Amino acid sequence: MPLLDQCYSDAIWHQINQKTKPVGALGELEKVAHQLALIQSNQQGKLARTINIDNPTVIVFAGDHGIADEGVSIAPSAVTQQMVLNFLAGGAAINCFCRANSVDLKVVDCGILLPVDEPDLIVQRLGERTNNLARQAAMTPQQLSDGLAFGQNLTQQVIDSGCRLLMFGEMGIANTSSASAILAALTELDVEQCVGLGTGISPEQLAKKVTLISQGVARCKGRDVHTVLAEVGGFEIVQMVGAYLAAAQNQTPVVVDGFIASVAAFAACKINPHCRQFMIFAHRSHESGHKHLLQCMEAAPLLDLSLRLGEGTGAVLAVPIIRAAAEFYNNMASFEQAGVEV
């Protein structure tokens, strides 16, 4: 996958700067519009005069984690299944935000402990849950390979159906442990910098969580990204990684959610650095490791609402801002059109 051709960049900025406003007056919205227009110009092979973000879709990947048995979360693994049923019934925060912002929602079973038999659920199970990453490799190389392929293929299908703006969310009790381990293993950060309170654990649980994650990280610190994902990853995280790879391959912008989704984005960029060009970071999570990750990715999120829910909620909340960026690029008059002299 080639880098985005920057030959359109100046023309896009000229179009933005000729709108009836002072140069730079719309701040970060101008950067979002420029990024979207540059992506679309590359898709079309010519300057994009308008931005298309039709059929925005969030895919929520769900998976369970063996490390949950160690008590690193306030909730048992059974809650993953219960929340998947809640998603399918329309009762979760992500459902509310999708309805409010006209975003399509797809839910994927990547490997939850207690399976669900519902027609609207996409089943891409890699197992009933990962192994306990503190004690052994979370998954086999084959499960990793299958997971990446599942995420890529599903995302390809969604794009082929007409989606022009993607978001990825997750659900899985103890998945902040997996995400923290991946971040610590792929960077120079200490485990303590990467581990947070997750769903709201006690100081004693936090200390235990750091110790357990450190055991997993010790097996793979500094290794290649595929090894790290197999050793300490999650079934939902590796499918998200594949999804990011497919989005970039199809030159489709992705709104990146919070800590766990951002860790998957970081891993995807380790596999293919060009993925970064297609990512718009939605928000700064309240999870402590996210600020370090955003620095690693040189990302400036659109929102800071102290969120730490996951599910893709922060990404969907950013959709109105992205729509506004596209709307001003597409329809705001230029000085010449409006007869305004400057």
Image: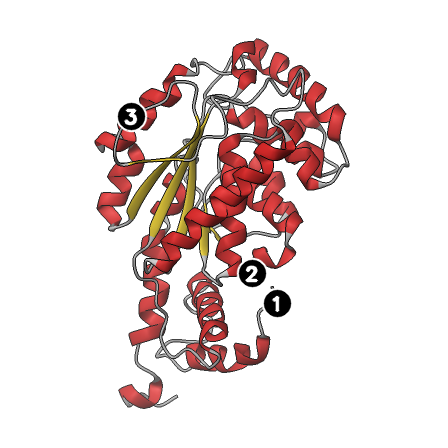
Residue topped by disc 1 = 3
Q: Which mark is residue 277?
A: 2
In this orientation, which residue lies closer to the viewer: 267 or 127? 127
- The correct choice, above or below, for 272 with respect to 137 in the image is below
Label 1 residue SS: loop
User: Residue at point 61% right, 34% down?
Assistant: 142
Label 2 residue SS: helix
- The correct choice, above or below, for 186 with respect to 29 in the image is above
- The image quadrant of residue 227 is top right
* Sequence order check, earlier mark of 1 and 3: 1
**On the rendered image, what quadrant is the C terminus found in?**
bottom left
In this orientation, which residue lies closer to the viewer: 299 or 147? 147
Q: CA distance from mark 1 to mark 3?
A: 42 Å
Residue 289 visible to the viewer = no
Q: Please, what is the three-letter code of the amino acid marked with disc 2?
A: Gln
> On the picture, is 2 further left or further right than 285?
right
How far across and down, in percent of the image, does residue 36 sit?
44, 66
Residue 96 visible to the viewer = yes
Q: How many residues crowd around disc 2 within 10 Å: few (fewer than 14), some, or many (20 or more)?
A: some
